[in-house]
Image (tube, rainbow, N blue to C red):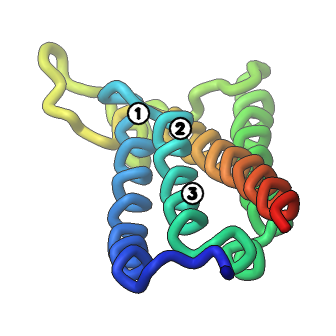
Amino acid sequence: MNGRMTPIVTTIAALLFPFVIVFSFYVIMHGHLTPGGGFQGGAIGASAIVMLIVAYGVKEIYKKTGDETLSIFESIGGLIFVLVGIIGFIMASSFLYNFLVGKPLFGDIPPFGSNPGELNTGGILPILNIAVGMKVIGGLASVILIMALATEGGKK
């Protein structure tokens, strides 16, 4: 047995994967407006990879992604987070200074009263949410992939 599920399961998993990733990105991007953010959206994104592991088998997913690719993805998220912090420190002598306030990109000041859900009012928070989401997707998916490989290797 190669660990691959039936064609029905693999087809449904392949069809659902992009929708789960888009929902993950939605939760990440709206984290400063609604409950959610980088961690929650990253966990949803990692669950999409887990769905593929269950449907296609761990060895096939490991061949296509591997822990190196996920580690690079996670590292890029950490690098973005640190770079945003350093840019804030350079601009105002304060790590993670919100240098995008009042700027057209993510920096519009929301109107007084009820916020109609304008996406570009978070300053650096959406960028930090993306960075955290990348770290969580890469980290959780790597851990689950390695655990699944260890479990698969234990079976004879």
Image quadrant where one finds the N terminus:
bottom right
Q: Count neighbours of disc 2 (C-alpha within 10 A) and say few if under 14, some if 14 to 19, many if 20 or more.
A: many
* Local secondary structure at mark 1: loop
* In-front residue for pair 1/43: 1
Q: Mark 3 belongs to which amino acid?
A: Val
Kindly report the distance in space between the C-alpha atoms of the residues bearing marks 2 and 1: 7 Å
Mark 2 touches mark 1? (CB < 8 Å) = yes
What residue is rendered at 81% in x and 62% in y? 155
Q: Mark 1 belongs to which amino acid?
A: Gly
Mark 3 touches mark 2? (CB < 8 Å) = no
For mark 3, what is the residue?
Answer: 50
Q: Mark 2 belongs to which amino acid?
A: Gly
Place of residue 104 in the rendered image (x, y in percent of width and height, measured from the top left) = 38, 47
Residue 156, image quadrant = bottom right
Tag of residue 38: 2
Lower sequence index among marks 3 and 2? 2
Lower sequence index among marks 2 and 1? 1
Q: Is residue 2 above or below residue 48?
A: below
* Local secondary structure at mark 3: helix
What residue is rendered at 79% in x and 48% in y? 79
For mark 1, what is the residue?
Answer: 31
Place of residue 144 in the rendered image (x, y in percent of width and height, measured from the top left) = 70, 50
